[in-house]
């Protein structure tokens, strides 16, 4: 009887470890996918607008925007957002992602 309990406990431990590992892998894949999408959007913007005067002029406003979690929206940053979205309408980046990309220039 004791050996059956011991085998049952070992089987449950094996199943629990497997479930935890699978959960970890799924969570990790989700986080990595989200970071990769954000990085792709940022690299698309930074490679295209390295020497764009409208975008470069918005760097101070972008810093304020990011630091305030989007509460401070300067005129130059708004102009840069509009300019970027007009030149690259297929770009599906949030305002925060664009502001971070502008800061990365």
Image (cartoon, helix red, strand yellow):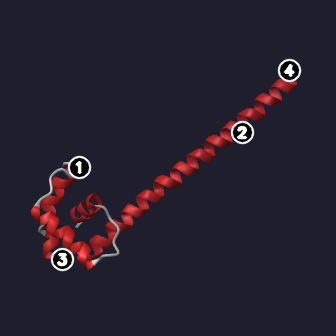
Residue sitting at x 25%, y 79%: 87
Q: Earlier in the sequence, mark 4 or mark 1?
A: 4
Q: Earlier in the sequence, mark 2 or mark 4?
A: 4
Badge 2 is on which residue?
15
Badge 1 is on which residue?
69
CB atoms of marks 4 and 3 within 8 Å: no
Residue 2, labelled with which disc? Answer: 4
- Between the C-alphas of marks 2 and 4, the distance is 20 Å
- Between the C-alphas of marks 4 and 1, the distance is 59 Å
- Between the C-alphas of marks 3 and 1, the distance is 26 Å
Report which quarter residue 89 is drawn in. Answer: bottom left
- Between the C-alphas of marks 4 and 3, the distance is 74 Å
Residue 101, labelled with which disc? Answer: none
36 left or right of 11 in image: left
Q: What secondary structure is marked by label 3?
A: loop
80 left or right of 4 in image: left
Q: Residue 24 appears at what percent x and percent y?
A: 56, 46
- Between the C-alphas of marks 2 and 3, the distance is 56 Å
Q: Is residue 22 above or below residue 44?
A: above
Q: What secondary structure is marked by label 1?
A: loop
- Between the C-alphas of marks 1 and 2, the distance is 43 Å
Q: What secondary structure is marked by label 2?
A: helix
Q: Is residue 62 above or below residue 81?
A: above
Q: Earlier in the sequence, mark 1 or mark 2?
A: 2
Q: What secondary structure is marked by label 4?
A: helix
């Amino acid at each position: 009887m004791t050996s059956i309990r011991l085998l049952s406990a070992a089987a449950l431990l094996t199943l629990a470890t497997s479930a935890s590992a699978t959960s970890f892998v799924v969570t990790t894949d989700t986080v990595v996918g989200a970071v990769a999408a954000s990085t792709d959007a940022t690299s698309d913007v930074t490679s295209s607008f390295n020497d764009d005067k409208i975008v470069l002029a918005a760097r101070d406003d972008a810093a304020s925007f990011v630091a305030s979690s989007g509460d401070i929206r300067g005129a130059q940053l708004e102009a840069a957002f509009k300019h970027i979205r007009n030149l690259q309408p297929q770009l599906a980046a949030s305002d925060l992602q664009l502001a971070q990309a502008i800061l990365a220039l």
